[in-house]
Structure formats: C-alpha cells, structure tokens
Image: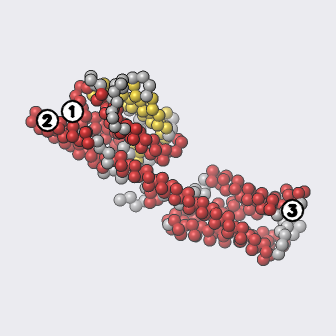
C-alpha cells in the first residue's frame, strides 16, 4: 500500500487551490480589485472623489488579499491533512481573524496618521462592516472551493471507474480463441502451449490487477508485447508488428492500459479483417518535453466490425488523457485512405513509476 501522498490517488485529491502558484495569486488580486471597485461604487460618494475612495479601499483589500494568500500558502499542507470539512472551517476562521487584525491595524494607523490614512465612521462601525463584508466574501469563496473540490473529486471517481471498466474489458472472443489455441498446442507443441498460458496469465494480471492511474512506459510496452505474442500464435504469418520505440524513455509514465488496447483495436478491427493480414506499426519519438506514440494498421475497405469497441476504447483513452494532462496532451485519429492511425502526444513525466 502507498502511504505517502500520491497525485494519482483520489484520497489525496486537493481540497484547496495552490495558493503558492503565480496564477492563483493573479486571480486573487484581480478578484480583490473587483471587490474594491464594487464597494467604492456602492458608497455613493461624489464622482470627483471616486478615485480617491477607490485607492483607499483597494489598498486595504489588496493587503488583506495578499496576506491571506501568503497565509493559506503556508498552511496548505496542514489544511489538506486535516480533511475536507475541517480544512474549510479552519481556513474560514483563520482568514476571518486575519481580516480583523488587518482592519484593526488600519484603524490604528488612521488614528495615528489621520492626515494620510482616512477611514470614515467610528471604530465599532468600521470593524463591524469589515467583519460582515469579509464573512460574506470568505464564505462565498469557501463555497466555491467546496463545489470545485467536489467537481474534481467526481471527475477522478469517474475516471477511476472507467479505468476499472477498461481493465475488465477483455473481449470474450479473445479468451475463447486463446484457449482454443492453447488446447491445440498442448498436443502439437507443449512448450509453446506452456508459454502461451504464462503469457495469458501475465496479460490478465496486467489488465485486472492494476491499481495505479499511471504506469511506466516500459511496463505498457511489455503488456502490449505479451498481447502480440498471444495473437501471433493464432494469426501466424498474417500478423506482423513493427516496433520503433527506441527513442522513448522507458521510465516515462503514461496512463495505464493505453497501448495494449490500441494494439488490440488495430488487430481486431484491421488485421483480422484482411484475408492476407498485414503489419501494425508502433512508432515513438521524443519531441522536446513531449512524447509522441503512433499506432497504425491497414484498413480492410468495406469491412467493419458490428461492435463499437473501437470507439469505446478510444473515448476512454481520450478522457483519461484529458484528465491526466488537460490541454497539454492530444489524442488524434487519422482515418483517411487505407491506413488507420492513432497518435498520442503527451508531456514527458519521468517520475518514479
């Protein structure tokens, strides 16, 4: 079992955004300034005083926003380990206290340097207004974060369910054909029959026993090679697979069960429909900080399977790539002419597999 934080595990799904990231800071500053503009417009002051009032309001709110962001950045690890509900409650209380402390400091500065910093109203009124406004803003922000967290969690759960479904998706015809092939080899070539049983066992273990969302590229290629050997026993000279993947770093991580289903589709929807068979090409290369893998197979013109397994597997892989990489990865299909090609392009990740 994995005890440390695993970015691919749903149980470690982040409840809060990364307050240390520059993008998050930019959004917070932008929202803070919009709130300052809204509060200034709501004050109904003279038009000629708008910019002065906006500068004072912005100064206070931006200080609160920046200090709050820095505080949440420092506490993020603790809040994540506290659990979802406690993280939001503790975050709300900490931010509320911080707002009141900053407001009190602003009031004291105004009292001492009244000519430079001017806050209208009495001390209790100012503190009460700060408490009310900050409570509403923080509560809305926490509500947004909660909804965003639940949305991310549902996406992860759906992806894991799809992975489990894909792991269990072993076509019955493949098992029947493999078992028949093994049965025929037990008399004619017992040694090859034993190897086929071991290959089938390894393939079933890879398909049904995987628990990680990502695996090493080496492991993915080995699983696909096992599948190729099993199909080679049945199809014989009709099946040829050319592997050109020497440029790929074998430690690179890729969503589990990606290459083997694509190779299976290439054989099932391509090679098997051709009377003389054909060659499946698996090519891979490194393009800067991205990897590219293409799997192509000849197409039997006018021949198609009645089942939609090809589309289902492709849809599954596309969704898992989108979840894993967002818009940094692409899954493209070239279905033109007499060749069907699927190309995967995704960021290089050589983390420990």
Crowd band around label 2 with a 10 angstrom C-alpha radius: few (<14), some (14–19), many (20+): some
User: From mark 2 to mark 1, how far is it between C-alphas?
Assistant: 9 Å
Q: Is residue 243 visible?
A: no
Category of crowding for the residue at label 1, using alpha-carbon neighbours closer than 10 angstroms: few (below 14), some (14–19), many (at least 20): some
Rendered residue at 83%/68% (across/down): 119
Q: Position of residue 247 (x, y in %)?
A: 41, 32
Badge 3 element: loop
The reply to whether discs 3 and 1 touch (Cβ–Cβ < 8 Å) is no
* Quadrant of the frame with the N terminus: bottom left
Q: What's the distance in space between the residues labelled 3 and 2, CA to CA?
A: 92 Å
Residue 278: image x %, image y %? Answer: 30, 24
Among numbered discs 2 and 1, the one appearing first in the sequence: 2
Left or right of 239? Residue 157 is: right
Q: Residue at x 74, y 56 (%)?
A: 33
CA distance for labels 3 and 1: 85 Å
Which residue is denoted by mark 2 in the rendering?
Answer: 185
Tag 3 and tag 2, C-beta contact below 8 Å: no
Find disc 1 in the rendering and name its residue. 233
Q: Dot 3 corresponds to which residue?
A: 45
Q: Image point 56% across, 57% down: which residue?
A: 148
Q: Is residue 296 left or right of residue 103?
A: left
Residue drawn where x is 85% and y is 67% of the image: 118
Q: 247 left or right of 222?
A: right
Q: For the residues labelled 2 and 1, say whether their Cβ atoms are less than 8 Å apart.
A: yes
**Mark 1: secondary structure:** helix
Q: Nearer the viewer, mark 3 or mark 1?
A: 3
């Amino acid at each position: 079992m994995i005890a440390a934080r695993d970015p691919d595990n749903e149980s470690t799904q982040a409840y809060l955004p990364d307050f240390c990231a520059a993008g998050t800071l930019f959004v917070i500053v932008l929202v803070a300034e919009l709130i300052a503009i809204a509060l200034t417009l709501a004050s109904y002051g003279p038009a000629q005083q708008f910019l002065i009032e906006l500068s004072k309001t912005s100064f206070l709110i931006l200080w609160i926003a920046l200090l709050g962001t820095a505080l949440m950045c420092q506490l993020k690890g603790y809040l994540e380990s506290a659990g979802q509900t406690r993280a939001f409650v503790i975050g709300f209380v900490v931010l509320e206290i911080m707002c009141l402390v900053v407001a009190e400091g602003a009031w004291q500065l105004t009292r001492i340097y009244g000519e430079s910093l001017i806050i209208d109203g009495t001390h209790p009124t100012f503190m009460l207004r700060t408490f009310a406004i900050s409570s509403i803003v923080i509560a809305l922000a926490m509500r947004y974060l909660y909804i965003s967290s639940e949305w991310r969690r549902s996406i992860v759960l759906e992806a894991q369910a799809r992975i489990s479904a894909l792991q269990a998706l072993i076509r019955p015809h493949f098992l029947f054909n493999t078992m028949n092939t093994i049965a025929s080899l037990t008399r004619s070539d017992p040694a090859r029959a034993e190897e086929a049983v071991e290959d089938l066992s390894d393939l079933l273990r890879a398909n049904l026993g995987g628990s990680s969302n990502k695996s090493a590229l080496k492991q993915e290629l080995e699983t696909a090679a096992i599948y190729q050997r099993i199909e080679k026993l049945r199809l014989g000279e009709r099946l040829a697979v050319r592997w050109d993947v020497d440029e790929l770093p074998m430690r690179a991580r890729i969503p589990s069960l990606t290459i083997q289903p694509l190779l299976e589709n290439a054989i099932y929807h391509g090679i098997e429909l051709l009377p003389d068979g054909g060659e499946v090409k698996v090519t891979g290369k490194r393009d800067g900080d991205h990897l590219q893998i293409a799997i192509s197979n000849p197409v039997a013109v006018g021949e198609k399977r009645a089942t939609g397994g090809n589309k289902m597997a492709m849809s599954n892989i596309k969704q898992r790539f989108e979840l894993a990489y967002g818009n940094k990865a692409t899954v493209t299909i070239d279905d033109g002419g007499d060749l069907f090609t699927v190309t995967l392009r995704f960021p290089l990740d050589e983390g420990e597999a």
